[in-house]
Image (spheres, rainbow, N blue to C red):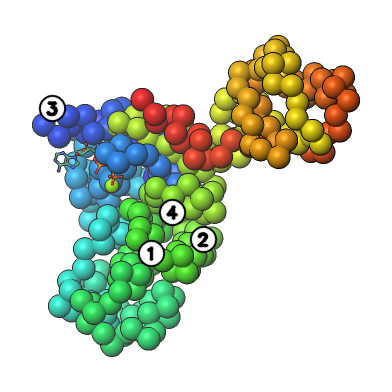
Amino acid sequence: MSIIVKNITKLYDTQKALDNVSFKVGQGEVVGLLGPNGAGKSTMMKIITCYKRQTSGYASVCGMDVNDNPLAVKQVVGYLPENNPLYLDMHVKESLAFVAGVYQMKNIKKRVEEMIELTGLGKEQHKRIAALSKGYRQRLGLAHALIHDPKVLILDEPTSGLDPNQLIDIRNLIKDIGKTKTVLFSTHIMQEAEAICSRVIIIDKGIIKADDSIENLQKNFTSQFVLQIEVDKPISMPKLKALKGITAVEEKGNNVYIIESKSNITKEIQQLIADQGLVLLDLHRKEHTMESIFHELTKN
Ligand SMILES: Nc1ncnc2c1ncn2[C@@H]1O[C@H](COP(=O)(O)OP(=O)(O)OP(=O)(O)O)[C@@H](O)[C@H]1O
Ligand SMILES: [Mg+2]
């Protein structure tokens, strides 16, 4: 296992930021850590990367205890912290060489060039960091996290504040990195989780609410069926609402209806439509979106 987190609790004074959290991330997995503001995502990442100590519980990276071997853990972990702190007065190349030096790397010049190439910083490489746009600062933060060729990457909101084009570039970069490394990253963008992750962990108020593949979450998350139907003329609403098991009906206009029910009532709906002499133009089951799942799990 690349990351093992077992019964981690973190107290800030009397506030529980993490409450008995456990999960594992296997080698080569790309896992999204999702949760509302204040859920405990950054705190969890700081513990895994040895920047904060847990109050109780155990965490290890590549088999090394984060409390016993912080230096060894930092050697195998690349970390992009929240808000991407950078020395604004340094130049791009200088800052990369500085970080490579901290890791006591050999052949620093070559490695800096490789990182500039990998993160698409070519055109900006001679600039002072203060002069870089947000997206390029984010790329530089990623280059810092990657420079010592870590086995595990911990990225805290790596795409926050990026424009749509940069977003796609950075997502693709993370996806590419995920082919050879273990990645744990946090995001508030559900489409991003869907685009990048093999699995998501949803955390709320320091407690894990879900830990599964997106596919499984969408399949198993609720017992509700959501159907969308389209007919040629309006359906009688009282008759539709009277069907057994129906919990909600929404009229979308143009004779399109979204129907929620406790069981699969496709047959009953088809029967009702036939009885009313209507023509069924479309009937399909709607998947639960990651947004609706996230909302459902973290709403209270
Ligand atoms: N140094 C600290 N001292 C006191 N409380 C803290 C400290 N750091 C975090 N907290 C509290 O711990 C809780 C979890 O914070 P954390 O930053 O881990 O959340 P998060 O999930 O990363 O949120 P966001 O999505 O807003 O980044 C919050 O209530 C926060 O106020
Ligand atoms: Mg955070």
The reply, left or right, for residue 152 in relation to residue 81 is: right
Q: Dividing the image into 4 quarters, which one contains the N terminus?
A: top left
Tell me which numbered mark, 3 or 1, is placed earlier along the sequence: 3
> Which residue occupies 39% across, 55% down?
152
| Disc 3 residue: CB within 8 Å of ligand 1 | no
Q: Residues within 10 Å of mark 4 (few under 14, many from 20)?
A: many
Q: Amino acid at mark 1?
A: Leu
Identify which residue, 238 or 283, lies in the foreground. Answer: 238
Q: Amino acid at mark 3?
A: Thr
Percent across and percent down for residue 150 are: 37, 62
Question: In the image, is residue 134 above or below residue 193?
Answer: below
Tell me which numbered mark, 3 or 4, is placed earlier along the sequence: 3
Please name the residue that numbered disc 4 is placed on: 183
Identify which residue, 137 or 1, lies in the foreground. Answer: 137
Q: Amino acid at mark 4?
A: Val
- Estimate the spatial distance between the alpha carbons at disc 2 and disc 1, rounded to whole Å: 17 Å
Identify which residue, 192 or 237, lies in the foreground. Answer: 237
